[in-house]
Image: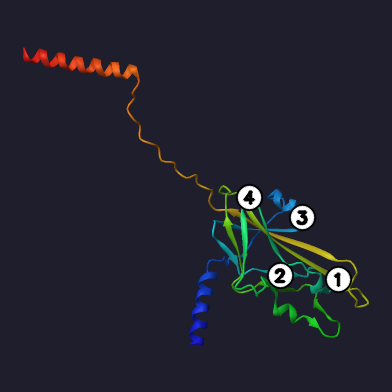
Amino acid sequence: MKSFSKIIAAGIMLAYMTTSTYAAYEEVTCSADSVYAANSCDQCFTWGAVSQGDNKGLLDDIWNNDGTTDQVLFKEEQEMPRIVSLGGASWTEVTASDSVDFWTYTSDLDALYSDESLWNVLSAGSSVKWIESTVGSAYQLTNNPVAAGGNVGMIVYDIAVHNIEADGAPSTDTLQHRECVLYTSGAGEVPPSVPQPPRLPETGAEHLLLAFVALMLGFGFLKFRNR
């Protein structure tokens, strides 16, 4: 019975997560939209349009070491990614349960941990997926008053690393990097149609006079025919 419950739960979870987007981000120049500069973005992406009720899950970020020296990451220095609401839209952070964190460090990052040096080391020219959203976690667009094409939200990924110096110790200078993924509105808010009340016949004095004249003309026509 417990196994059957687990299968049902897994099926529900899978159905929920299929509303998420698997497509890769599209990298754009940070001058493509002023919202990137407003959020101090160093590297900029767009992930297309979303509509009210859409979920964005199965998220992750890559740590790229493009330098010529090894780099170190300390988990204690990291800030978890977050979503920024734009244009009056509202996003809700959804998790599988209250006891589950939205973000988690990956096993790939943990594999870079050195028991000797007590830090995570990434060699020059390498990359690793260092953080990801947990299964069942997603950002949900719960309110979208933004017209089609307008900005509704942006996921901000911050990472802080240190270069390894010649003596093998990490530099005291922190290299801060911020990646931003922008979402736009897929559909604008449609104003509700207001039913119009039926038009009643006019009842003013002039309309009564016209009605009386029409009646008299009709009576005269009938009298003329009878002759």
* Location of mark 3 (residue): 40
Tell me residue 212's x, y (percent): 24, 17
Frontmost of labels 4 and 2 is 4
Mark pair 4, 2: CA separation: 30 Å
Foreground pick, 12 / 157:
12
Mark pair 1, 2: CA separation: 17 Å
Tell me residue 175's x, y (percent): 83, 65
Position of 30 relative to 129 (above/below): above
Which residue is most to the left?
Answer: 227
Asked whether the beta carbons under mark 4 and mark 3 sit within 8 Å of each other, the answer is no
* Location of mark 4 (residue): 88
Which is more N-terminal, label 3 or label 4?
3
Q: Amino acid at mark 2?
A: Ile
Which residue is most to the right?
Answer: 167
Which is more N-terminal, label 2 or label 3?
3
Mark pair 4, 3: CA separation: 20 Å
Q: Amino acid at mark 3?
A: Ser
* Location of mark 1 (residue): 163
**Residue 67 can be seen, yes or no:** no
Q: Amino acid at mark 4?
A: Gly
Assess disc 3: are there few (<14), some (14-19) or many (≥20) residues with their C-alpha within 10 Å of its C-alpha. Answer: some
Determine the secondary structure under disc 2: strand
Left or right: 143, with 207 as reference point:
right
Determine the secondary structure under disc 3: loop
Asked whether the beta carbons under mark 3 and mark 1 sit within 8 Å of each other, the answer is no
Foreground pick, 35 / 200:
200
Position of 219 relative to 97 (above/below): above
Position of 161 relative to 7 (above/below): above
**Residue 86 can be seen, yes or no:** yes
